[in-house]
Amino acid sequence: YYRGAMGIALVYDVTDERSFNNIRNWINLVEQHASEGVNKILIGNKLDWVEKKTITKEQGQALADEFGIKFLEVSAKANINVEEVFFTLARYYCILTECY
């Protein structure tokens, strides 16, 4: 599933610490099986569940920084930043491949 991908979205649930902790495993799998230099973005989903949020934006950003990847928080339910994920991946891909 990884080979030939131009972009990979690594998604965790901001209300579930276990899903956040699993991101390192997913990144290791991507690094083992995806094409070298594939665009990656870390996404914290369920931003609309403010009262149940356990993973802070700062924690998400720190993890993204650790791996040198982009980071966004989104809410698929409330349609917050969903399009921005795809625009960010596309822009980053175009920068790397000089598609402008």
Image: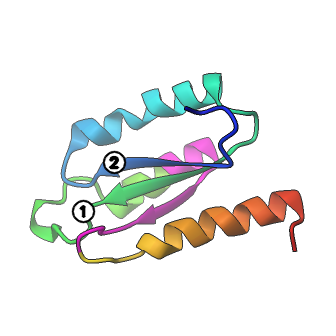
**Residue 51 picture location, percent across and down:** 10, 67
Q: Secondary structure at mark 1?
A: loop
The dot on residue 67 is none
Q: For the magenta stretch, what is the residue range?
A: 63-77
**Residue 52 picture location, percent across and down:** 11, 60
Which residue matches tag 2?
12
Specify the farthest residue to the left: 51
Q: Quadrant of the N terminus?
A: top right
**Residue 28 picture location, percent across and down:** 54, 26
Q: Is 78 in front, or is 66?
A: 78
The residue at 70%/38% (across/down) is: 4
Dot 1 or dot 2: first in sequence order is 2
| Cα–Cα gap, marks 1 and 2 | 9 Å
The residue at 55%/66% (across/down) is: 86
* Relative horizontal placement of residue 2, taking residue 16 as reference (left or right): right
Q: Is 40 in front, or is 56?
A: 40
**Residue 93 picture location, percent across and down:** 74, 59
Q: Is residue 48 magenta?
A: no
The vertical placement of 59 against 25, above or below, is: below
The vertical placement of 27 against 70, above or below, is: above
Mark 2, residues whose alpha carbon is within 10 Å: few (<14), some, or many (≥20)?
many
Q: Is residue 70 magenta?
A: yes
Tally of numbered discs? 2
Give, as a three-letter code, the residue at label 2.
Answer: Tyr
Specify the farthest residue to the top: 32
* Relative horizontal placement of residue 43, taking residue 21 as reference (left or right): right
Mark 1, residues whose alpha carbon is within 10 Å: few (<14), some, or many (≥20)?
many
The residue at 47%/57% (across/down) is: 61
The vertical placement of 70 against 25, above or below, is: below
Which residue matches tag 1?
46
